[in-house]
Image (spheres, rainbow, N blue to C red):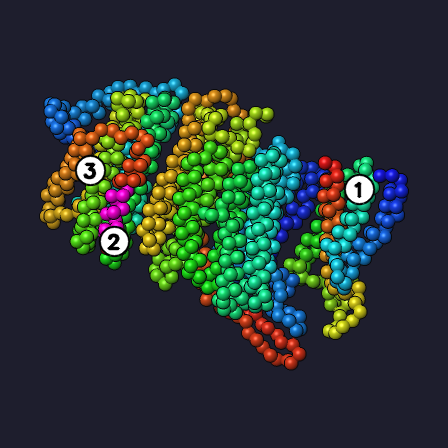
Amino acid sequence: MRNFIILVITIPLLTAFLLPLLKIFSKKLSNFCIGLNLILINIISFFLYKSILENGNIIYSVGASAPSITAPSGFPIRIILTANALSSFLAMFFTIIASLTFFYSLNTLKEYANLDKFYILYLLLLVGILGFLFVGDFFTLFVFYEISSISTAGLIVFLRNKENFKSTFHYLSIFSIGSLFLLLGIGLLYSQYGFLNMAIISQKIQLSFLDKIALSFIGSALLLKVGVFPFYFWKIEAYKVSPISAIILSILSSLSAIYVMFKIVFYIFGLNIPFIIALTLLSALSILFGNLLALAQKNLKKIIAYLAISELGYIILGISSGFLMQNSKFEFNAIKGGLFHIINDALDIGTLSLIIGVILYIAKIKNSLSYNSVSLQQNEIRGLAHKYPLLSISFLLVILALSGLPPLNGFASKIIIYESIFHLNPALTIIGVLGSILTLAVLIKIFALIFLGAPNRDYQPAPKIAMVVIFIFLSFMILIGLFPMQFTNYFINPSVKALISKPGYKNNIHLQQDNQEQNHSIIHLTLHSKQRYFNYI
Amino acid sequence: MNRVVKIISLIMLSPIIIFGGYIICHGHLTPGGGFQGGVVIASAIALLIIAFEDKIIKNHLFSLIETIGLTFFISIAFVGIFKNTFFYNFLSNTNYILGKTIYFGANSGYLNSGGIIPLMNLAVGVEVASALSFIILSIKNK
Amino acid sequence: MFNLILKFILIMLIIIGSISLGLIFEGIDRILTAKMQKRVGPPILQPFYDIRKLMIKESIIPKYAIKWIFELSPIISLTVSILILFYIPIVGKSILGGSNDLILVVYLFIFPGLSIVLGALSSNSTYSNIGAQRLVINMLGYEFPLAIACFVPVWLVYKSGFSNIFSLNTIYTHNIWGLVNQIGIIGLLIEIIAIFLIIAGELSKSPFDLDTADSEIAGGALAEYSGRNLAMLNLSEAVKIIAISSLFIALFFPWNIQSNLIIMFLIYILKLFFIIFISLTLIKTVTSRFKISKLTGIYWGYVSLLATIGFLLVLF
């Protein structure tokens, strides 16, 4: 059972490596293998989540049976992966969305060359996202940061136009600076304490001035990956030109970076109040800026990017306000709202981008419109609602969900966030309500320009598997919207308890020096007090 | 390029490849290892590519060899799951293939030791060599 | 079981009562406007006659209109307007009240506007397009001061230490005028001025009535509607008058005499008349229409400034 952590990460890795071999036999075989692997990962991550709920956190060391076995004279240097309820829940959820997006991309990308390389990079990005959720020491953090950023760069450049090259260069230059910052922060910590293990550093840390500099470096590198207010420019450039499945996976990687950032800031550096106040302000600004700038855009994929930025602002606002209100009864609710909104944000923005992908696929005539984007100003696509009623109903439901209108899932999470952040500052609630109105205005504009009116030419029929995937997403949205209490009780409450139980994490890994023999000093890492969440039979 | 360069590059091919293989195989004893040895082998293939300008090697051959190297790497790591955890060194300290037990203290280095580390070096060397040759061939072919 | 039957009867009462009350108040508003403009107005029951006439006529749908959106939007508009009334405490507790219904009500107020916008945009007519765009800008404008004005009582209830602060029942039972000091009373008075302007904006009456500017764009957002659809849209307008006035009565004017139900209801109708007279009739008669380019500036500038000053004064 405890090997499931590493299986979730390495089965797509194995498939990604096998793909060039399988492509020689037939293309259908390789697609079938990818689909099989993704379904396998879904099942494994579900069982992993179940076993964590029953048995407590899992700490897995790569290459040894327990994290404590070391060289005779040394301290433990191991690659450690840890899983708690929140990371395994996010892993389960992300694999579901990634596999559905893969089936969607089979349909809409089928006439492009080099598609096998696209899928290799897709699987590698999935490995990067899932590994990022499970990191237990800083070296693994750096490795998975690099894997995700370089795979995303390869996915952005897939279409090989001039704009793609420019955007990829922009993205790569920003992320090379980001990974250098991360390396610098990790180096500062390592040089002070001599350990790379997150649990040991969290026990030994004294918050000296160098540690705060390390926090700022690591925090800014991770915030760059998230993409909130001042760090969002790579997102605009990257989302403008990449295919839709790459956009959805990139959103998932930003969401996983949120979890890692809060884990590091909260577990290792203690609760650093100025950092979290700065996070709250930045997230409020990103809600406002994301929505206001989206009103002025003419490029459909750029609008997706700006709306994604504003939704990320809601998530970070909820979680960081919860951390600011420590020891009050609203902390649990605020963090619960933020984590719930991660799920809803991935579903809503995912469905929006899937629908826009179908629109771009429908409107494509071979030498006239590029796949990259459609400018709303020329209004080249008009009147789709006459021929595609199902697509327009889906878009209407996405409008309701993304703006946070009842009865869909956006409202369920936003109301929890609003009522909790009101106790911090009422201005934040007002900014939140304003943001949802602005999102509504942006989406109505798109809907009116593209779907309503008289049709101006003939369009291709809608791809069927893509519509099925859109309906699956919509059914998730409607179900979560209609039964939010059941959903949060089963899935979100254990995750919130996992995130805020900081002493629980420290007690789980206890460093205890044991001088038995004079030549060896054996350092034990023992597991205390497994956390039981509830009896899940 | 003229005939002299072509013949000399063919003559120099084998020492360079043997030297690269030496770096790869002794990775667990001397500085070097998979990545460095692979780069040396790739430099040999780069020599070939620059000397002979017609297309004698196709790109997908390198892609295949790279795949074989990578799958070998991951599969050996997977085998460790059956013993203990992922990437477990199931060959070391058993006196079977690569697992001579080494005692604490300075020694002159035994090639027979190390467990799965030499195998990993081999896989990484193959992979890096073919990947870098792929890159150089793509640059040349443009 | 008895509770369920009682709730069912109350729901039916509210549906019928709100529609009739809304139409009667619209009639009163028309005749008062006429008298203020030195005309003889229509009879008080004129809106009823209008609805009856519209129900008999045929609904005409334009050729390239998207039929299902066009016909669905008046139904949604009317339904959600009536749904809002279930959450607002009128003479006691609200029918469907829960713990977080203030935010729910603020969001539900978006729905009638949203459905009119979608219906107008789907009718493929230039006048409707312009009207719908103006209505979107109108909605964008008034939501900001509406949010500020709605959260003032919440903050007062929170500061006084009650729980369940977002529930309308809680705000209704704890009178906010008793929770402020003297500076706060001035703040609340300024807030009420902003509220009258917000009500006029929400109901699209002058000076904010660009979306149905009769003389400019031939009816605007409602241009292509006729017959039964137009009747339902008129009904939803009437119910919206009652809904938003009741919301602000529950938030800002919750006084009442604790006597039997009939007298409380009559006092409620008196308060309704007071608010509708000031914010609809009075403001409508003395002002003319704002230009579209200045609208957002007025909402986010002047009206929000008033609301924010009120909030800040209440804070101290």
Chain at tag 2: C
Quadrant where the C terminus of chain B sits is top right
Picture quadrant of residue A19: top right
User: What numbered label is drawn on residue C13?
Assistant: 3
The residues tagged by marks 3 and 2 sit, at their Cα atoms, a distance apart of 39 Å
Q: Secondary structure at mark 2?
A: helix
The reply to whether discs 2 and 1 touch (Cβ–Cβ < 8 Å) is no
Q: Secondary structure at mark 3?
A: helix
Q: Nearer the viewer, residue B134 or B99?
A: B134
User: What numbered label is drawn on residue A174?
Assistant: none
Q: Nearer the viewer, residue C237 or A296?
A: A296
What residue would you read off at disc 1? B49
Disc 2 crowd rating (10 Å Cα; few below 14, some 14-19, many 20+) is some
- The picture places residue A199, in percent across and down from the top left corner, at 53, 65
- The picture places residue C31, in percent across and down from the top left corner, at 13, 27
Tag 1: amino acid = Ile
Reply yes or no: does residue C308 show up in magenta: yes
The residues tagged by marks 2 and 1 sit, at their Cα atoms, a distance apart of 78 Å
Picture quadrant of residue C267: top left
Picture quadrant of residue C59: top left
Tag 2: amino acid = Leu
Disc 3 crowd rating (10 Å Cα; few below 14, some 14-19, many 20+) is few
Which portion, as a residue range, is magenta? C304-314
Tag 3: amino acid = Leu
| Res A125 seen here | no
Nearest-to-viewer mark from 3 and 1:
1
What residue would you read off at disc 2? C315
SS majority, magenta: helix
Q: Residue at x 30, y 25 (%)?
A: C220
The residues tagged by marks 3 and 1 sit, at their Cα atoms, a distance apart of 89 Å
